[in-house]
Amino acid sequence: MKLLDGKTAIITGASRGIGKGIALAFAQHGANVAFTYSSSAEAAKALENELNSLGIKAKGYQSDAASFDQAQQLADDVVKEFGSIDILVNNAGITKDNLLMRISEEDFDKVIEVNLKSVFNMTKAVQRTMLKQRKGSIINMSSVVGVKGNAGQTNYAASKAGIIGFSKSVALELGSRNIRSNVIAPGFIETEMTAKLDENTVKGWREAIPLKRGGTPEDIANACVFLASDMSDYITGQTLNVDGGMLT
């Protein structure tokens, strides 16, 4: 059974890692996929081809979700190209880790802008279309760090905690129009980014997780499929920790 048949999704930051995993899972479940990337045009083109080969319609857009105007333009382009926006996954994000005493104002501002303001930009951009349709599912990517904090990540934790508060407020504002807003808080997910880390560090992290493994992009994607589909029709304003039990 294809859970997302005929739905159109926008996924930000999808040329690699978790975003790519979500795009593939959505396409496998029958969704048409519009995705954004910042600079990796080659990877984006390869993903676009891979998604289209699954029998759905897919298109990559070079767009910066941290720009209010670009987010608005993207939403307009997607409606023109695909006819609707049923699902929004705000996945684009960066880290610029440092202890508070060493972190620069610029690094604090940048992480808030890319991680948190982008969620405001994109949600505002798709809102009009979803209100017209009287239906929509917004899924915002937070982190276990946004739930419990982490030393050396004040900027990242603040941005990810902000996403949770924002999403709950949107759920309250738009619930009467059948628009749902939920959060996924991934734990330690093994991607190209974590592959560069020291093996012993990674081993230590795995050992500390009750399920004794890091998560995969597919683990996050499966949770996204559920929240994007009609199976979660009565779920809004929630934060789903997909973390192997880290926060238990």
Image: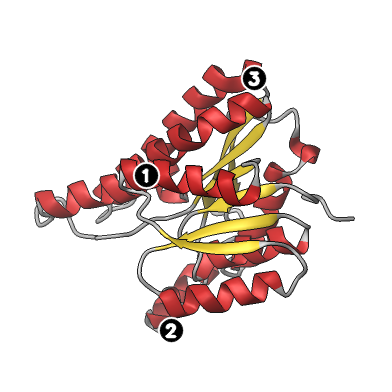
Query: Does the residue at mark 2 contact the one at mark 1 (Cβ under 8 Å)?
Result: no
- Name the residue at 77% across, 50% down: 4
Secondary structure beneath label 2? helix
Per the image, the residue denoted by label 1 is 118
Cα–Cα gap, marks 2 and 1: 33 Å
Which comes before the other along the chain, label 2 or label 1?
1
Nearest to viewer (mark 2 / mark 1) = 1
Secondary structure beneath label 1? helix
Which mark, by number, is residue 183? none
Residue 61 location, x and y as percent? 47, 61
Cα–Cα gap, marks 3 and 1: 23 Å
- Name the residue at 51% across, 69% down: 17
Which comes before the other along the chain, label 3 or label 1?
1
Q: Residues within 10 Å of mark 2 (few under 14, many from 20)?
A: few
- Name the residue at 42% across, 55% down: 92
User: Is residue 174 visible to us here?
Assistant: yes
